[in-house]
Structures are given as C-alpha cells and as structure tokens.
Amino acid sequence: MEYRALAGCYDEMTQDVDYRAWADFLEALFARSGRPVRTVLDLACGTGTMTCLLAQRGYELIGVDFSPEMLAMAAEKGAEVAGEKPIFLCQAMEELDLYGTVDACVCLLDSVNHVTVPENLQEAFHRVWLFLEPGGSFLFDVHTPAHLQSLDGEMFLDETEDAYCVWRTDYDPGSRICTYAMDVFQREGALWRRGEEVHEEYAYTPEELEASLRQAGFVEIQQYGEGKLSPPEEGEERIFFTARKPEGCKEQRSEKNG
C-alpha cells in the first residue's frame, strides 16, 4: 500500500479528525501509566500532524512511516516546530529499528489494521517492545471487525476546493480484509490530475490483539472506548489499547530471536 496520490491531499481529507482531542486523550493515558513520559515514538505517523502536536507540547518525538511521500510532508511540518524538532524515519512497522529506546509508543488512526499479515503485526509488536524503556507504554487504536464488515459495498466521497476523492469498500469475510479502492483527483491549475490507490485493513479481534501483545512480552493490557477512560461499549467502531513493557526488563530482545 502506498500513499502517492493521497499524500498531497491527506490533511485536507482528514480535517474532521480532532487531533488536539486525541492528543489530550493520549496525555490522559500517559498519566494513567504513572510513569513520566518524555520520549515518544509516533509509529505510522503519516503526515506528522500528531507527531508535531506532541512535540509542541514538550515531548521528544520520533515519527516513523513507510511512505516517503507522507514523510516529506511531515518533515515540512516538523521544521516549523519551536524547540526540539521531531526526527522522522522511513520504516515499515515490522522493520522498526531505532537508535535508542523511548518512554512510549503511539500508533494511531487504525494503522494497526493496515498491517494485513498477522505474522508481520506480531513482529511489529516485538519491535515496539524492543525499543521501549522498561515500564514504557504502547498505545494504539483499531477499527473493530464489526465496523470493517459494515463497510462492505459502501461508497464515500470526500471533497475540498482542490481535491476530490471517491472511495469504494469491499469486505471479504474469508480473508478478513476490507479493501478501499480510491480515485483521487487533485487540482493543478485549470486541470485536474487523477490518481488511484488501493488500501487494505485486516479485521483483528480484540482477543487476537491481546494474545499478540502478550506473546510480544507486554503486560497490563487495557482496552478503552474512543476518547473515553473507560472500557469500550458494545457497538464501538474504534477501540484503544494500552500495554506496558514490564519494569525491570533490562535485557533487550535481539533481532534474531524477536
């Protein structure tokens, strides 16, 4: 999956996302961990909106994404951050490789669903565990299987002054993958340039995600409803997870043994 056509208009198409409210929620979850958070990894950071917002709030940020096009836009935003500017790295989740450890890792906007091979997601969880400080927190959100299933056969339209995106969804119960086929039109002077992209999301169950987190070595796994410091309710479209690397876990897992 690539973000070549969508990268240039991604921010316009996601203006409905209240990033400040999401940042407030993340900070509330940081506080619940009872451990000071200074360094944060924003995994699958996209165009870096959350990365830069957290940096502006005083955290030291590393943004990681697999899309060079999205990272180019993130770097432009990062250059405008006052104080310590974020570092951006181009990596897939399952190939995460940092120079040191961080106090917390966040992975937002159902980016976990975009890892459509469960074995790759397991490796991604192991890599996050590896680069967390002992006691560090991992926070992410996912679309629920019921929500992805409900998108089957739907068509959506996003339109701004300079961009127009039509996307169609198809859910395959056999593969448990929801496919988004997108036609993206962007204004270039008096003309419009058309691009096409296909994105996929895998319908992970909460039970599968918890089991994968435990296999990676995480403990104290909690689930929350969207924007709420309480368990998810029935029918939620999005669930947040928090997990912790055990205190006193001084040894580092090698790449060989995962």
Image (spheres, rainbow, N blue to C red):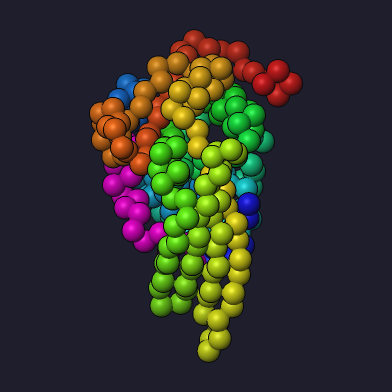
Q: Count the marks: how many?
A: 0
Q: Position of residue 162 (x, y in %)?
A: 46, 77
Residue at figure coordinates x 41%, y 20% from the top left: 221
Q: Position of residue 147 (x, y in %)?
A: 40, 43
Which residue reaches farthest right? 256
In the rendered view, tell whether residue 55 sits above or below residue 2: above
Which residue reaches farthest top? 248
Residue at figure coordinates x 40%, y 30% from the top left: 241
Q: Position of residue 219 (x, y in %)?
A: 45, 16
Q: Position of residue 215 (x, y in %)?
A: 56, 17
Q: Quadrant of residue 11?
A: bottom left
Of residue 241 and residue 19, the one placed in the foreground of this image is 241
Residue at figure coordinates x 51%, y 19% from the top left: 211
- Name the quadrant of the C terminus: top right
Q: Is residue 76 visible?
A: no
Q: Is residue 182 left or right of residue 158?
A: right
Residue 207 is a magenta residue: no
In the rendered view, tell whether residue 258 sits above or below residue 170: above
Q: Quadrant of residue 137?
A: top left
Identify the magenta region: 9-28
Of residue 47 and residue 147, the one placed in the foreground of this image is 147
Q: Is residue 251 visible?
A: yes
Q: Is residue 70 left or right of residue 23?
A: right
